[in-house]
Amino acid sequence: MMSEKQAKNDAGWNFDNSYSRLPHFFYTKINPTPVSSPKLILLNTPLAASLGLNEGALRSRDSLAIFAGNQIPDGGLSIAQAYAGHQFGQFNRLGDGRAHLLGEQLTPYGERVDIQLKGSGKTPYSRYLDGRAGLGPMLREYIISEAMYALGIPTTRSLTVVSTGETFLRETEQSGAILTRIAASHIRFATFQYASEFGTVDELRALADYTIRRHFPEALGAENRYLALLEEVIQRQAQLIAKWQLVGFVHGVMNTDNIAVSGETIDYGPCAFLDVYDPETVFSTRDTEGRYAFGKQPEIAAWNLARFAEALLPLLHDDEKQGAQLIANAIAHFSKQYHANWLAGMRSKLGIWKEESEDESLIQGLLHLMHTYRADYTNTFRALTLDKPEDTLMYDKLDFRQWYERWQARLSRQQETKADSQQLMRSHNPAIIPRNHRVEEALASAVNQEDYTVMERLLEVLSTPFAYSPEQVDYVSPADLTACAYRTFCGT
C-alpha cells in the first residue's frame, strides 16, 4: 500500500496544481502504482538546480520514493490526463496510459513546469496494458531529450530515471523503469480534440482560456483570443519543425497526441537522427507506409495543425463558415513560416549572412548531391564548417566540385569575412548528434551489464554539440554503411 504520508520538502518542491482546477472531464485523480525496490539510475543535476531543487535531498530515500511513484511530494496532486486524437490518421480516444502528472513546479526563475512520471503504472486510460515502461526506452528518452536541449531545440527534459526492481512482459521480459519528465505543459493537440469531440463548448473554452493564460498571455488582449491562440501555436510549430529538419531529426510518430501546444518536442518513441541524407528515411517499425518520413514532417505538421484548428472552430466564430475561413487563412501561413525558418537556418549552416534570391537553389543543390551520393547529413556540414571538403564522400565528384565553387563565389560576395562565416556555421552545424549506433551501444551496456559509464560519457559529449572538441571526434562517425538499416520501436 502507498503511504499516506507526504514526502518532506527538503528537496525544494514548490508545487501548484492549476491543471487540476480545470473541469474533472480533463483528468482522473489517481496515484501511481508502487514498486518494490526502486533505485536511482540517473539524476540531471543542472536541470534540478534550474528548477530550484536540492541535489543532495533529491538523492535521499524520500525523494527516491517520489520518483518511483511510491509517495506524492508535498503539495503535489497525482492525476492522469485525458485526450483523444489521430494516430497514423485514425481518431482514437486516448489518455495517459502509463503516466502521472504530479503537479507544476514553480521555479525560482518564475517558470511553471509540469513534473510527470512516465512508466508509473495503470490509469483509467491504460486500456489493456500494465502502465509500465522498460529501462532501455526510458534511458533512451533521457539521452535524446537532453541532446535536443543541447542542440537548442524546444523539448521536454528528463530529470531522473529510476529502476523499479521489477520486470514486466512485452515481446520479451524487460526491466522496469520510471522517467521523471519536465515539460512546459502536457497540453496536446489531442487534448483540444478530446474537448471538442466529447466535451461541451464551455469545457473547450475553459481549456483554451487556461492554455492562453499559461502559454500565450499576450493573446488575452487580442480582438479574437482564440484566433490569436491558433496563430501562436502555428508560429511555434513552424519554428520547431524547421529546427528538426535542420539537424536531421526524425520524430517518427507525429500523432496529434504527441504534439504539444507549447511548441516543445514531446514523446520520444521511435525517434532517431539521419546518418545518410534521404528525405524518405523512416526508422519506426510501425510506420510501414512512410507517413512520418523525414521529408514529410512539415506536411504532417500542417495536417496536425488543421486538426487542432478544427477543434477550436466553435470558439473562433459564431458563424461556422466564417470560422472555417479563419482556419484556412491561418493554416495557409504555416508553410510560409516554416519555409522562412528553414531557409534562414540553412543559410546559417552555409555561412550565408544575408539573403540572395539564388540561395535556395544553392541549398537544394547541396541536398540533391547528398541524396544522390548517400552522404552523411551531419558530417557533410561539419566538413564544410571546418573547410575540409575533402572529408566528404562527394569530394571526387565533378558536380560537387562545381557546387563548391558556386558556394565559394556566393560567400565572396559578402561583406563578412571567411572567419565570420565559419563562426556562423560552427554555431549552427553540430559537430556531433546522438548517433543511432552510439545510443544503442550505451543502452545495451546499461541494460545488459548495468554499466552506465558508456551512457554517461555519451551524455557528456552530447551536452556541447557545437564545441568541435577533440573529445568528440570518436563520436562523429556514422555506423558502418554495410550494417543493416537502423530500426526503432515505440518503446517509450
Image (cartoon, grey):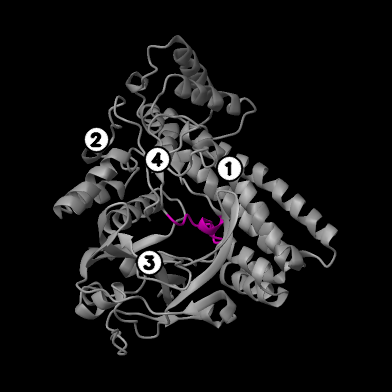
Q: Nearer the viewer, mark 4 or mark 2?
A: 4
Instruction: Give whichever of discs 3 and 1 has the lower sequence position.
Output: 3
Instruction: Give whichever of discs 4 and 1 has the lower sequence position.
Output: 4
Please tell me in which quadrant of the rendered image residue 71 appears.
bottom left
Identify the residue at horizontal 35%, vertical 85% (top origin).
Answer: 74
Identify the residue at horizontal 40%, vertical 82% (top origin).
Answer: 76
Label placed on residue 309:
none
Query: Which of the two residues, 316 or 395, is positioned nearer the viewer here?
Result: 316
Instruction: Give whichever of discs 4 and 3 has the lower sequence position.
Output: 3
How far apart are the two marked residues, 3 and 1, measured between alpha carbons? 32 Å
Query: Which of the two residues, 357 or 310, is positioned nearer the viewer here?
Result: 310
How far apart are the two marked residues, 4 and 2, measured between alpha carbons? 18 Å
Identify the residue at horizontal 54%, vertical 43% (top origin).
Answer: 242
Q: Is residue 452 left or right of residue 30?
A: left
Marks 3 and 2 close (CB-CB < 8 Å):
no
Give the magenta range.
Answer: 256-267
Residue 484 is situated, as x and y percent measured from the top left of the image, at 32, 30
Label 2 belongs to which residue?
A: 473
Which structural element holds mark 2?
helix
Label placed on residue 131:
3
For the C terminus, the image quarter is bottom left
Instruction: Give whichever of discs 4 and 2 has the lower sequence position.
Output: 4
Query: Which of the two residues, 408 or 224, is positioned nearer the viewer here?
Result: 224
Amino acid under disc 4: Phe
Label 1 belongs to which residue?
A: 298
Label 4 belongs to which residue?
A: 273
Q: Residues within 10 Å of mark 2 (few under 14, many from 20)?
A: few
How far apart are the two marked residues, 4 and 1, measured between alpha carbons? 16 Å
